[in-house]
Image (cartoon, rainbow, N blue to C red):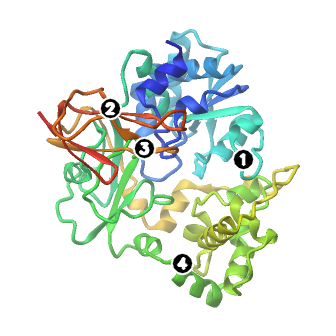
């Protein structure tokens, strides 16, 4: 069986949060295969620890993925501060006799270093066109855990386990390996959270992660982290702002200082992104037209809202607001033809520690040690049929069926973009509801 087929059979998707089916990503030809080990979101620890303790497997998966796309070189992007991990990876490359085929390239400890387009520029010097993807400049990017899953697929293992960091205002920050579909509350309990009445949970990193509506959900194949903060924390309050409130704020407070634009990572790469103009348009309720399509070039990193703006208004939400209107009207953005990095870019990168200080989370910058054995054996799991980009999977089992770990229980229809879904524990199908298959341990 070819590698692409093994990846498809294993149900591998982007484990860093995007959820794009990996077999489809590797169907293209590229000059470079890039490993995103930047983990630019504050407080998360999955990638750096996987590279430390499973470096050889990750390098192996990356190299195999590179062969699949015909890449001439595989490059691992990792922040300069992870000196120990960099040393380990270089040693692993030597031991695997992959020197000259796989290399490690340290990148600055800034936000958002893990943004695909920022990473491509840092590792290759190439600029991905606005609204474009890395393959347009001969690059394919995969996450560290995705590379590990690719290696595991060559060993006949499907994606049934997930690594997740639980951090923030918790007594016991941890990174755990758990079955896909594990109840989120189990992870929070393991980190020492028992009283949920005064805390809110961010699904992902503090910058881009949305607030969980409740804690009754389940871990998916793209869950990366859970950040716990008091419900009155300023960051939580920022994430609770509605579009209606954002319009009022943007109308009343914006002074057009353009700091949101000057510090925007996509603008610094030479893209057309100009959040201050979108704030102005939202404030005056201007009609959506071709001039507003620069809203599509926003990467939603939230740097403008959570760091740059001195008035505390919502430039990113202005981009999101106009993107929605323009999409509904069928108006598309016409990308520029030439790109040149802004001359002040090197002086406008945002250090991670400075960002954490502004967010009010620097005191939570603590180790979250990896529990590499299966840390939780849940009695019940809820496995999503749509935790990926593409056509939702259709259940291949029925209520009352016995299933075993690794068994295919769902699959996207026909030739549609999608993936297979596997049982993460041995058990009995309890129910199929809300695009989830609930399995009770046998």
Label 3 belongs to which residue? 222
Mark 4 / mark 1, whichever is N-terminal: 1
Q: Which mark is residue 132?
A: 1
Mark 4 / mark 3, whichever is N-terminal: 3
- The residue lying furthest to the bottom in this view is 252
Judging depth in this view, the residue of 28 and 308 nearest the camera is 28
Label 4 belongs to which residue? 243
Mark 2 / mark 4, whichever is N-terminal: 2
> In terms of image quadrants, where is residue 125?
top right
The answer for how far apart the CA atoms under marks 4 and 3 are is: 27 Å
The answer for how far apart the CA atoms under marks 2 and 4 are is: 37 Å
Residue contact at pointers 4 and 1, CB within 8 angstroms: no
State whether residue 35 appears in this view.
no
Mark 3 / mark 2, whichever is N-terminal: 2
The answer for how far apart the CA atoms under marks 3 and 2 are is: 12 Å
Residue contact at pointers 3 and 1, CB within 8 angstroms: no
Q: Is residue 288 left or right of residue 148?
A: right
Secondary-structure class at tag 3: loop
Would you call the spot at circle 1 few (<14 residues within 10 Å), some (14-19), or many (20 or more)?
Answer: few
Identified at 75% across, 56% down, the residue is 268
The answer for how far apart the CA atoms under marks 2 and 1 are is: 31 Å
Label 2 belongs to which residue? 160
- Percent position (x, y) of residue 420? 41, 33
């Amino acid at each position: 069986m070819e590698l692409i087929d093994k990846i498809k059979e294993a149900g591998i998707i982007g484990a860093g949060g995007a959820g794009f089916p990996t077999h489809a990503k590797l169907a293209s030809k590229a000059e470079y295969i890039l490993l995103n080990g930047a983990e630019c979101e504050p407080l998360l620890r999955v990638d750096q620890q996987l590279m430390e303790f499973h470096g050889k497997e990750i390098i192996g998966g990356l190299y195999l993925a590179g062969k699949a796309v015909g890449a001439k070189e595989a490059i691992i992007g990792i922040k300069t501060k992870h000196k120990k991990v960099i040393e380990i990876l270089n040693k692993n490359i030597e031991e695997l006799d992959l020197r000259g085929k796989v290399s490690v390239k340290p990148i600055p400890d800034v936000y958002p270093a893990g943004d695909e387009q920022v990473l491509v520029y840092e590792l290759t010097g190439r600029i991905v066109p606005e609204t474009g993807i890395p393959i347009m400049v001969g690059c394919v990017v995969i996450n560290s855990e995705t590379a590990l899953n690719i290696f595991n697929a060559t060993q006949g293992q499907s994606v049934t386990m997930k690594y997740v960091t639980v951090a923030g205002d918790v007594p016991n920050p941890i990174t755990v390996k758990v079955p896909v579909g594990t109840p989120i509350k189990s992870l929070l309990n393991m980190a020492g959270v028992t009283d949920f009445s005064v805390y809110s949970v961010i699904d992902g990193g503090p910058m881009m992660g949305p607030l969980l509506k409740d804690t009754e959900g389940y871990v998916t194949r793209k869950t990366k982290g859970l950040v716990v903060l008091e419900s009155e924390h300023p960051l939580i309050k920022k994430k609770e702002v509605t579009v209606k409130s954002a319009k009022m704020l943007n109308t009343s407070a914006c002074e057009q200082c353009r700091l949101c634009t000057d510090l925007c990572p996509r603008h610094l790469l030479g893209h057309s992104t100009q959040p201050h103009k979108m704030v102005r348009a939202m404030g005056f309720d201007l009609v959506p037209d071709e001039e507003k399509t620069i809203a599509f070039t926003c990467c939603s990193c939230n740097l403008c809202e959570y760091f740059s703006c001195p008035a505390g208004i919502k430039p990113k939400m202005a981009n999101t607001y106009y993107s929605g209107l323009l999409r509904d009207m069928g108006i598309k953005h016409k990308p520029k033809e030439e790109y040149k990095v802004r001359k002040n870019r090197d002086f406008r990168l945002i250090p991670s520690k400075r960002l954490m200080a502004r967010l009010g989370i620097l005191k939570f910058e603590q180790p979250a040690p990896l529990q590499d054995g299966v840390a939780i054996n849940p009695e019940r799991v809820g496995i999503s049929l749509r935790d990926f980009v593409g056509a939702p999977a259709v259940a291949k089992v029925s209520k009352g069926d016995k299933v075993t770990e690794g068994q295919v229980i769902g699959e996207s229809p026909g030739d549609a973009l999608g993936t297979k879904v596997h049982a993460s524990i041995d058990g009995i199908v309890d129910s199929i509801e809300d695009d989830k298959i609930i399995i009770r341990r046998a």
